[in-house]
Amino acid sequence: MRELSRGLVIAIVWMALAPVAAHAGQLCDPAFQDCREPLLNLIRAEQTGIDVAFWFMEDARYSAELVRKAQQGVSIRVLVDSRANAGHPLNGDIIAQLAAAGIPIRVKTGGPILHWKLMLFATQGQVEFSGANYSPSSFTPDVPYLNYTDESIYFTSDPAIVHSFMTKFDDSWIDPSSSPTTRTCRPRARAGTRSSQSPRSSIFPPARITARARLRATTPSRPRSTCRCSGSPTVRTPTQ
């Protein structure tokens, strides 16, 4: 019995120290794990498109990798809320850096704040989401279990969950309450057809989506942005 307990302890310690891999259903704990490097690796590995949304970003590691991927021809879309800049001035610098690289950005200008923190990866069929803002201290501890930000970072490649987030992102991308900030903005259009949505998702359950679709069908169209763009949107279809 003692040997069994010792083996169990060793197994638990090994799992705790093992590197975090961004695969289906991976929950990363920045109290003792490096959750930043797996996310950076997803950005570096993407070949088709990355969708990003955040309340604020203050870690230039992420923005630098996003700019690098844009320069390589990867399609990137970013949703932000400039109202975060008052309390997080570095966020304005990050947004300016992304805009200067020609990355399409849409800014939420009214209603509830955009409080998302997520990245979607089209070719890899992955989504990363959490309550953690993209700041230097939120994804990795300074000292494990002693000096860290209490967050939980979730990575998944579950197609239903990924498609649900893609659909929600597209809904916000074409929402007229957001405005473009770059001259290279793409048309307000969905980025492809979504096959399925997760019935487990409490963030935007199918019943709510269906009700919203019915409301749109009976509601007069609202004026769209006057931004004139050319080209066509990149299809966001995760690899199955």
Image (tube, helix red, strand yellow):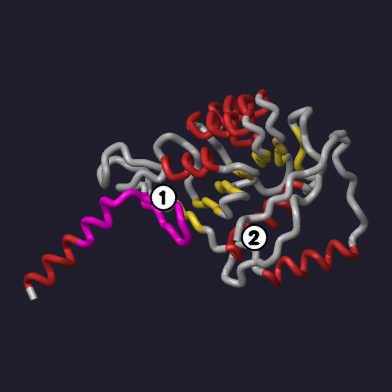
Pointer 2 with pointer 1, Cβ within 8 A? no
Q: Which mark is residue 163?
A: 2
Question: The N terminus appears in which quarter of the rendering?
Answer: bottom left
- The amino acid type found where label 2 is placed reads His
Element at label 1: loop
Q: Which mark is residue 201?
A: none
Q: Is 169 in front, or is 86?
A: 169
Q: Is residue 143 magenta?
A: no
Q: CA separation, marks 2 and 1?
A: 24 Å
Residue at image x 77%, y 69%?
Answer: 211
Instruction: Report the magenta residues as a range.
Output: 11-29
Residue found at the very far left of the displayed protein: 2
Q: Which mark is residue 151?
A: 1
Q: Is 230 placed above or below 123 here?
A: above
Residue 78 in the figure: left or right of residue 147: right
* Mark 1 neighbour class, 10 Å CA radius: few under 14, some 14 to 19, many 20 or more: some
Residue 95 in the figure: left or right of residue 211: left
Residue at image x 74%, y 31%?
Answer: 181
Residue found at the very far bottom of the displayed protein: 1
Q: Is 27 in front, or is 113?
A: 27
Residue at image x 61%, y 68%?
Answer: 198
Where does the image place residue 71, in percent across and percent down from the top left? 63, 28
Residue found at the very far right of the displayed protein: 220
Where does the image place residue 6, in percent across and percent down from the top left? 11, 65
Q: Is residue 19 magenta?
A: yes
Where does the image place residue 40, in percent across and percent down from the top left? 47, 39
- Indicate the quadrant where residue 49 lies: top right
- The amino acid type found where label 1 is placed reads Glu
Where does the image place residue 5, in percent across and percent down from the top left? 13, 69
Q: Is 127 placed above or below 100 here?
A: below
Element at label 2: helix
Question: The C terminus appears in which quarter of the rendering?
Answer: bottom right
